[in-house]
Amino acid sequence: MGSCFHCGESVPPDVRLSANVGGDMRPVCCIGCQAAVEWIAGLGLADYYRLREGPAVRATSESGYAEWDRPRLARMHVRILGADRSEAVLLVEGLRCAACAWLIERALTSAPGVHEVGVNAVMRRVRIVFDPQSIRLSDLMQALARLGYAPHPLCAAAIDSLRQRESRIAMKRLAVAGLGTMQAMMYAVALYAGVFDGIDSSVREFFRWMGMLVATPVVLYSASAFFAGAVREWRAHRLSMDTPIAIAIASIYMASAAATMRGSGEVYFDSVSMFVFFLLLGRYVEMRTRHRASDVVDALARLQPATAERRVGERYETVGVHELEIGDRVRVASGSTFPVDGTLVAARCLVDESVLTGESAPRSHLAGDAVIAGSIALDGPVEIVVLRLGADTLLAGIARMVTRAGSARPRLVTIADAAAARFVLRILAITALTAVAWLILDPVRAFASAVSVLVISCPCAFALAAPASLTRAVALLARNGVLVVDANALETLAHVDRFVFDKTGTLTEPRIDIAGISVSRGTPEEALGLAAALEQGSTHPLAQALRVAAVGVELPLASALGITAGGGVFGRIGERELRLGRTTFALGGVGLDDDVLVLADSLGEIARFPVNERLRQEVPATISTLQGEGADCELLSGDHPARVATVAAALGLRAWSARATPTDKLMRIQKLREDGHVVAMIGDGVNDAPVLAAADVAIAIGSGAALAHAASGILLAESGVAGILRARDIARQMLRILQRNLRWTYAYNIVAVPLAAFGLVPPWLAALGMSASSLLVVANSFAIGRVNATRHPIKPHPPVVAIAASGAA
């Protein structure tokens, strides 16, 4: 009875199944594993079995995923990107290593209708962009199951289960290593004491055999991950931190075991046990750091409740969130979480959005304002109208963005991995040279000195320096409402010398001049009600300004709402087709485009809403701080020259452009980059996607749909440019801590390796030094965010500057 080639389980005696892999027949335990092996081999991906870290999870031949194709369930996890593109993020059980990621990416990419596959092995996430007309979600989940990876929808229960399993395994390995280390040291102390006090040879041999007895499970069980990692590296023809660790552990243990069996020579069972214990302790701390870094993202999956109270006539019924439909009315009790993105029906409500935006102070929302799934109603009960649910919510959008960012390898990590590989080659060469030199000079000291060189070096510190610093920085910013979508953008932000700002919604807040409203038909209150109804659910700054102006006004029910880019909004209220926006849009090309908002129907103009602007409170201090740190700031807007000039003068900006088209903005960004500037473009994420994408660093400021869909590397969940200062400070601290870690690692190796090569450091002390260096790198990364890196602290902002709209004052 052998083991299954795919999952490693025992093959039952009555099973005679096999799978053809490159002409060789391999035993399998069931039809599911047979299908998985033959499918993987048929795709030309048999190298997976050579590169994998361990056996796969037992495959299944049954689907069991058809229910996820039901429209109401599918929309909770599948987001429609276009006519032929949908996106899903799955939590995958059994995803362990780079070989698993390699297999999943290639197997799914080869399936018809799959456009893109991204795998985050650390967080066990798989992001798939596919054509729902060509392949179903259940087909993709079944494909993962055939590979031996059990897929789950991204939910709190699955996340907690996988995390607990990982922590439990790590703790068991650490506990075995810790107990083995204590026992091995006790026996070693007795042996060391016997050197001076005298000890019977039989007693000495007993202690040596007992040392081997307690060290064996430490090496075979606790250190098994290092051996598996080294084998995986050799098969993949690359070197990393596991190679010297595995060689050192195996060398020390086998040499000590040989000495024990011979009855002569030195034994180092205490050293090898201590070595494994300190390494596992370092990796446990690293795992906890990684879990803390993903807490912010995983918390998103825990925010959305499973049920909601839907209004049916005059009563409420409790239903699953997946049963809701857009337009349903949902009641949210005081202290409860909003289950979906929606539009507030109540006159006013305090909402806690701290988990999503990092802003601790509750925000007051008015009737017609958008509320976000996962935020908490502090006073209620309140009613909302369902606007977005499932995969279309901001909550799901943030999780997708972080998954997408985690599937890529930032430049910092790639460079660190390459440096670690080169370092390992040098250490192996120095180890061999040390052994040869001592064999010539003093053969007795050759083994201990060579092992000490191998042990005392710290490729772990090289490899951990960048991920530890980056993980800490990203997690810290996420807790402060700054989402890093592209890790490379954070590195680049530290070097930005030119900040280019959009105006409306970024630097200024529009306000409706209620006293200046001009009404052609009806009353100002009726006109405000119609306009605010058309803007319900919109995140555009002007829409929010209209809703603020309409506080206390009863809003009619609007339907068939739509947006015309650069023009305005339209919809139906009762039997009337209404349009709201620029004059040329609302009146069909009649009249001057004078930047006021015009409300019109088929009979013509109904009302005009003059728009005033004022600077956001945090803007003057932010611009002043950036300029004080030597960065140039520029205003690039499509607005009227008089208004742009007023804002630029109020902020002390010499460089500004008005009436800039998207093409003009692109050309300006390109010109700045050609002149050698590192450019950051800051926009509100509504109409700035092409320009944001052209900058070295793209920063979107906004909320709701604008935040979820912005083409940016850094997103500020809290609407305010002050977050840029925090992000820039953290980025600079990250690079400084990274450089400090690398300098420390270089200095440590320059001093420690020669000492070990000259035989001045015993293996046990070398193990302690290596583990301490790695722990120091991880611990040092937690210094990020504990100090303010800004040389010029933010001063209290000057009084808010009011800016009258051109043609409206």
Image: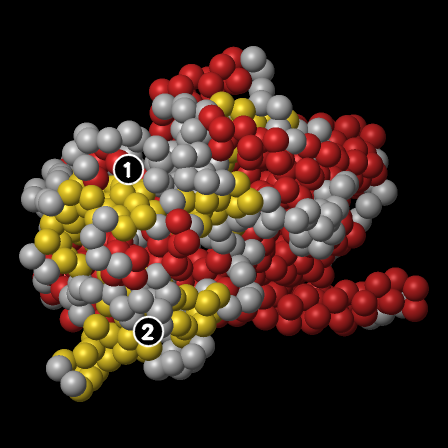
Q: How is the image coloured?
A: secondary structure
Which mark, by number, is residue 582? 1
> In the rendered image, which quarter is residue 84 located in?
top left
Q: Quadrant of the N terminus?
A: bottom left
Q: Left or right: 33 with respect to 683?
A: left
SS type, badge 2 = loop
Residue 88 vertical placement versus 175 (above, below): above
Q: Nearer the viewer, mark 1 or mark 2?
A: 1
Q: From mark 1 to mark 2, how far is it between C-alphas? A: 30 Å
> Does dot 1 land on a helix, a strand or a loop?
loop
Q: Amino acid at mark 1?
A: Arg
> Residue 586: x, y in percent?
21, 39
Residue at 54% from the left image edge and 24% from the top image edge: 656
Residue extending farthest to the right is 196
Q: Which residue is mark 2?
A: 346
Q: Specify whether residue 365 is in view.
A: yes
- Depth check: 16 or 62 in front? 62
